[in-house]
Amino acid sequence: MNIENHLITLTNMKASPIILLATALIICAPVKAQTPDTCEGIPQYVEEVQKNYVETGDYKKALKALRKLSKESKLRDCEYLNEVTPLIDHIKEVFVSDAYDRYGKDASNGVAEAQYKLANCFLKGENGLSQDLEEAVRWYNKAAELGYAPAQYMLGKCYKEGECGYHSDDETASWFMKAAEQGNADAQYELAMCYEQARGVKQSYGEAGELLKKAAEQGHPEAQNRLGEYYQSSLIGRRDYNEAVKWFRKAAEQGNANGLYNLGICYKNGRGVTKDLSESVNWFKKAGELGHDKAQYELGFSYKYGQGVEKDLEESARWYRLSAEQGNADAQNDLGVCYHTGQGVEKNYDEAVKWYRLAAEKENVYSLFNMGLCYAEGLSVGKDLNEAFKYYEKAAKLGHARSQLNLGDCYANGDGVRANYDEAVKWYKKAAEQDNEKAQFKLAECYHNGQGVEQDYAMAVKWYKMAAENGNADAQNSLGDCYFYGQGVKKDYDDAVKCYRKAAEQGLALAQVNLGSCYYNGNGVEKDNKEAAKWFEKAADQGSAEAQWALGSLYLMGEGVPKDDAMGVKWLSKSAEQGIAEAQFLLASCYQEGIGVEKSPEVAVYWLMLAAGQGEPNAQKALAYCYQNGNGVQKDENEAQKWFARAAQNDPQAKTEAQAKDNEQRRLLNYYKNLKKK
């Protein structure tokens, strides 16, 4: 029966006021612990001491009661006394501590503020007390039950962090709410986070925003920063960058690292303020010096590219390292890049892989991709296409376009996985839809060649155009081919030339050859041999065998360039050595006639054999004459007839237009007949 029921019963019995008062005092007084007679009674005795004295804050009586045990001769040999000693030492520590002198008496008498301060001493291990989370929570709870807002806030934190013996979102939110209702800014901020993250309350950004405003207006720096983020991301109504900057600045002015960083981002992107990269670096530095890993990463980026500050690769690497050492995955990846490329640090593939791997473990897509590259190329790790495939696949599934492209290549080429063009097309398409120009080109090639999809020139043109518009030179050239041959679009030499020119100006040798051919034949442009020679030479200098053949022919004929047989032979030799049959045939003609080189029928036969072996009909016919006449080779009518027959089968007039791309090729194939006239 509780006190109230006892008194009600006595009142109903019409007991005198003196009896009622005496009864109340007896009931309310702590039960006096009785010294046990046996060892078995010690645990219960200690429990009563804790309940009646320690928990009420009467450490003096608790100490006195426990000391009685050691004075009883019949209990001196009890093992239980060993368990009592630590409790006595703890009570002595509290009893003689500065904290107890300051707050103990008032705390024991139910003064909430004193209970809160005593709890703080236990929490932090201050004022002569050892840290004791259990005692701290007990005193916070007493003060919180009395409605003391700071204690309610601290009790909410204890439940949030599991210091109350267990974690409870419901208890966390409940105590934060009690404190927040009394205007405690810390509690208002924490309760806002509960509403934001649905911890102990139903998720509500509206409620969170209102609480953040209340705390921010009281000057709470974290609330000011988070409120700025709410305005920046439109979590409470429309996006308002001006309001965001206002609150970021307030937080920054209090030295809040997040506020400093976010204000730097605003200046970097020109949101809510005029874009000013130099100013953004200033704010990033302030945040970075406080250890903000994202600000440190931004500083690394700024110094790397000279944005808002003078470019300094060593300083860039320094800031990347500071951020990376705090576990920032982006910084770990970029520091890996520094070691990979030797930017700001000495090149070191082992260090590069170390940092890539750390970031990859956090599923950083850039590092997953870079680890794939390292395994594909065997940098610091053994070359392993299977491992490369695994890393590309992880990053690709996370949406990384370059990994999707490389994964498509793995399926197309059978690198680390069985070749599968259907899968290749699937991944090329994913990357292409993210505007990756290389993937767009390769997807177009699949449609053009019918690999992994049904051949579809119109779809090929669609993706060629996208890649071409994104500046892909290969796509510009291939789109030019589509216009030249009318594949997927209406044949249009003018448009073909436009596409070829864009690719050629980017230095694509194949496009330079195509553009040169257009000038030579007057397709889409006015015929201009000089311009043709210019583009052939650009491609020839890059090692294009086709361009070397064409340029060598022009020098022999003196078209677009001064006639120079030696130069002609030089370029034809380069082309012939790369296996161009037409160049081999013309070079053989030069050796037969002594044009630009000392006459040598034997060398001529050597080149004719190479060209004839590739099916070049004019070379086969010329070789047949050599065998028939014994020119550079022993006369052999059977060999002669064999090559005449092969030449007839390979009549160049039977070639399709796609095989004989333009009139220039046909003209050069017959050039041997006209050499003596030149």
Image: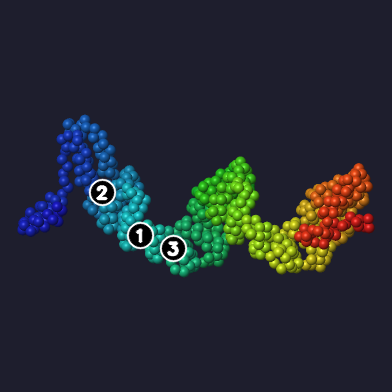
**Is residue 441 in sight in this rendering?**
no
In the picture of the structure, the residue carrying the numbered disc 1 is: 201
SS of the residue under disc 3: helix
| Rendered location of residue 137, percent (x, y) | 30, 50
SS of the residue under disc 2: helix
Q: Residue at x 16, y 46 (%)?
A: 31
Residue type, mark 1 in image: Val
Sort mark 3 into few (<14), some (14-19) or many (20+) by Cα contacts within 10 Å. many
Q: Are marks 3 and 2 in contact (CB under 8 Å)?
A: no
In the picture of the structure, the residue carrying the numbered disc 2 is: 104
Q: Is residue 74 left or right of residue 449?
A: left
SS of the residue under disc 1: loop
Residue type, mark 2 in image: Gly
Task: Kindly identify which numbered label has been placed on residue 227.
Answer: 3
**Front disc: 3 or 2:** 3
Sort mark 1 into few (<14), some (14-19) or many (20+) by Cα contacts within 10 Å. some
Sort mark 2 into few (<14), some (14-19) or many (20+) by Cα contacts within 10 Å. many
What is the CA distance from the residue labelled 3 to the residue labelled 2?
A: 40 Å
- The quadrant in which the C terminus is found is bottom right
> Which image quadrant is residue 436 in?
bottom right
Q: Are marks 1 and 2 in contact (CB under 8 Å)?
A: no
User: Foreground residue, 515 or 279?
Assistant: 515
